[in-house]
């Protein structure tokens, strides 16, 4: 046992028991459910060869779908960040009749089958729907079968993520900070911008990331409202489904693999941004 | 500045927090609001600060009506029990906050603000702490930064809500004596809230004993200690000893 000092030291420093067991368990189920299927995706995709890969990805229809998916998801997540933060503010800061009901309603998009949401949104926003008709009559805009329709659907399915990440942070934010700012002569607007918002940014950014990731993967609600016109309103997940329908398995996996890599890069970037924000926030 | 509170009434739902309270605090005086929790002492302090408004009654600052004056216009320095330092700002930014949001009023440039901040940090005995972050400071240090931040706007009155409540006994004793000497040095009208009898008797020029939304007695520490006006005061101060900090003139 003379040589085992480093080992026993390492062993004793584990204050919480069960580290080996829980890590092992986590790795096993992560591998089975997430990592192995993803690896299979890349292996399958690599079967097409470099030329085939380029041909699949750079086809105009695929490129258009990528551009549509990423841009509309980004804008929907951005709008959700503001709407969700305001809704969280209302839910936390004010007491009014129906507040609990509104609070429960927020989770609705989580629970509702997204296809149902898509059909409902399409019915309401189509040029002869309740909202779609007057909007079409007044502005000439078509809210369905356009990128705008996709945007509406993605806002619907994404906003609970922002509300539910910002809400607890706002609830924990002691009102004393705002009172202190006011006692130092800060107006309400100065207090919001200098004190409240900086405290909410990390949570809002997390909410943005979740809403964005969710929007990228969304399929059910979008297919009903978008009209699925190639080059115009065709999102990437739909394109993958269509390739699969035509038994183009390799093309489908290639598109999926690229989608995955780009999403991962974006998520890492946002994560990095968040860490950087936290660091400078603490040092500034 | 002289503060007069006249017949202040404040209710929260069905509970009455202040039931017709009147009090006068003279210019340069250090007054303690002493009482058990729920006695209305913090409510009274918040009304004077403008963090809350009375249902009826009036508050006068140097004879002028300040009852409905918003807190931003009152120029009060308020120090919270848990400091309420802005977590995402350095010590320097915290202390400078009041000067920066009122640039028009104070007419100070960046360098003047910096100089004023270092001067204030020397005053609270934290020279060179500008770049620290609040979470790097001890409780006593945070409370002194909070005091520097409140003093930055040259307040007309200083209001302290349980200022030593979250500190350990030793730091509390040191900080007490130091606040007393600082207050005498600055000659600023000061009201502080405490539920600690010894703290009130040791620090204050006058002690206001409160109970159940009423003032039971107002007097010098010796008066309330030796001649309690009501059974409650006598009971509440039983067992405390009278030891004042020698005034440092």
Image (cartoon, rainbow, N blue to C red):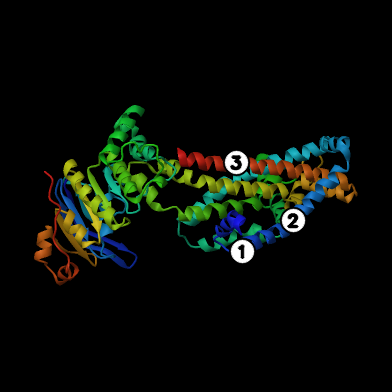
Quarter holding residue A67: top right
Relative placement, left or right, of A213 versus B21 is: right
Q: Which mark is residue A56?
A: none
Tag 1 residue: A18
Name the subunit of mark 2.
A
Chain letter of disc 3 in the image: A
Mark 2 touches mark 1? (CB < 8 Å): no
Quarter containing the C terminus of chain A: top left
| Mark 2 crowd level (few <14, some 14–19, many ≥20, 10 Å Cα) | some
Are marks 3 and 1 in one subunit? yes
Q: Which residue is mark 2?
A: A31
Q: Residue B122 in the image: state x and y as whole percent.
A: 27, 37
Sequence order check: which comes first, mark 2 or mark 1? Answer: 1
Q: Nearer the viewer, mark 3 or mark 1?
A: 1
Mark 1 lies on a secondary structure that is: loop
Q: Which residue is rendered at x = 62% and y = 46% of the image?
A: A209
Whole-angstrom CA distance, mark 2 to mark 1, is 20 Å
The outermost residue toward the right is A247
Q: Which residue is mark 3?
A: A272
Image coordinates for residue B41, horizontal then vertical, percent: 25, 60
- Quadrant assignment, res B55: bottom left
Chain identifier of the residue bearing label 1 in the image: A
Q: Which percent across, then down, holds residue B42?
A: 28, 58
The residue lying furthest to the front in this view is: A2
Q: What residue is shown at x 61% (from left), y 42% (from top)?
A: A270
The numbered mark, 2 or 3, whose residue comes first in the sequence reads 2
Which of the two residues, A50 or A147, is positioned nearer the viewer here? A50
Which badge, 3 or 1, is on the more N-terminal residue? 1
């Amino acid at each position: 046992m003379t040589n085992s000092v480093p080992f026993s030291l390492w062993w004793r420093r584990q204050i919480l028991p069960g580290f080996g067991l829980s890590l092992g368990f986590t790795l096993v189920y992560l591998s089975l459910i997430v990592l192995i299927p993803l690896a299979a995706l890349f292996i399958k995709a690599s079967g097409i060869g470099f030329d085939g890969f380029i041909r699949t990805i750079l086809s105009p229809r695929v490129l258009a779908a990528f551009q549509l998916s990423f841009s509309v998801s980004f804008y929907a997540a951005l709008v959700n960040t503001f709407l969700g933060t305001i809704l969280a503010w209302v839910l936390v800061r004010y007491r009014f009749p129906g507040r609990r009901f509104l609070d429960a309603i927020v989770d609705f998009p989580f629970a509702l089958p997204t296809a149902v949401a898509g059909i409902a949104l399409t019915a309401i926003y189509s040029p002869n729907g309740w909202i779609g008709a007057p909007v079409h009559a007044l502005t000439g805009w078509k809210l369905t079968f356009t990128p705008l329709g996709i945007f509406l659907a993605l806002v619907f399915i994404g906003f609970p993520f922002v509300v539910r990440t910002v809400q607890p942070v706002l609830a924990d934010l002691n009102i004393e900070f705002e009172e202190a700012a006011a006692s130092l002569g800060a107006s309400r607007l100065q207090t919001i911008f200098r004190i409240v918002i900086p405290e909410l940014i990390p949570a809002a950014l997390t909410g943005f990331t979740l809403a964005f990731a969710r929007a990228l993967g969304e399929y059910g609600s979008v297919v009903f409202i978008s009209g699925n016109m190639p080059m115009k309103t065709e999102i990437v997940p739909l394109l993958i489904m269509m390739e699969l329908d035509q038994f183009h398995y390799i093309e489908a996996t290639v598109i999926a693999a690229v989608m995955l890599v780009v999403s991962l890069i974006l998520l890492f970037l946002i994560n990095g941004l968040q860490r950087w924000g936290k660091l400078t926030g603490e040092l500034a | 500045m002289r503060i007069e509170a006249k017949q202040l009434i404040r209710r929260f739902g069905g509970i009455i927090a202040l039931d017709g309270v009147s009090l006068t605090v003279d210019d340069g005086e250090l007054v303690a609001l002493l009482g058990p929790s729920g006695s209305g002492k913090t409510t009274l302090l918040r009304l004077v600060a403008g963090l809350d408004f009375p249902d009826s009654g009036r508050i006068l600052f140097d004879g002028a009506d300040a009852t409905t004056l918003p807190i931003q216009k009152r120029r009060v320095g308020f120090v919270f029990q848990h400091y309420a330092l802005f977590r995402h700002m350095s010590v320097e930014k915290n202390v400078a906050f009041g000067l920066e949001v009122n640039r028009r009023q104070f007419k100070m440039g960046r360098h003047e603000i910096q100089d004023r901040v270092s001067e204030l940090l020397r005053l609270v005995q934290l020279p060179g702490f500008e770049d620290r972050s609040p979470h790097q400071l001890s409780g006593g240090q945070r409370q002194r930064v909070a005091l520097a931040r409140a003093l930055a706007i040259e307040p007309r009155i200083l209001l302290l809500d349980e200022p030593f409540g979250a500190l350990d006994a030793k730091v509390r004793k040191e900080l007490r004596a130091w606040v007393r000497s600082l207050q005498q040095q600055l000659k600023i009208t000061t009201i502080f809230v405490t539920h600690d009898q010894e703290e009130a008797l040791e620090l204050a020029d006058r002690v206001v004993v409160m109970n159940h939304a009423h003032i039971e007695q107002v007097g010098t520490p010796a008066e309330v200690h030796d001649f309690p006006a009501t059974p409650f005061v006598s009971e509440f101060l039983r067992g405390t000893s009278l030891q004042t900090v020698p005034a440092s003139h």
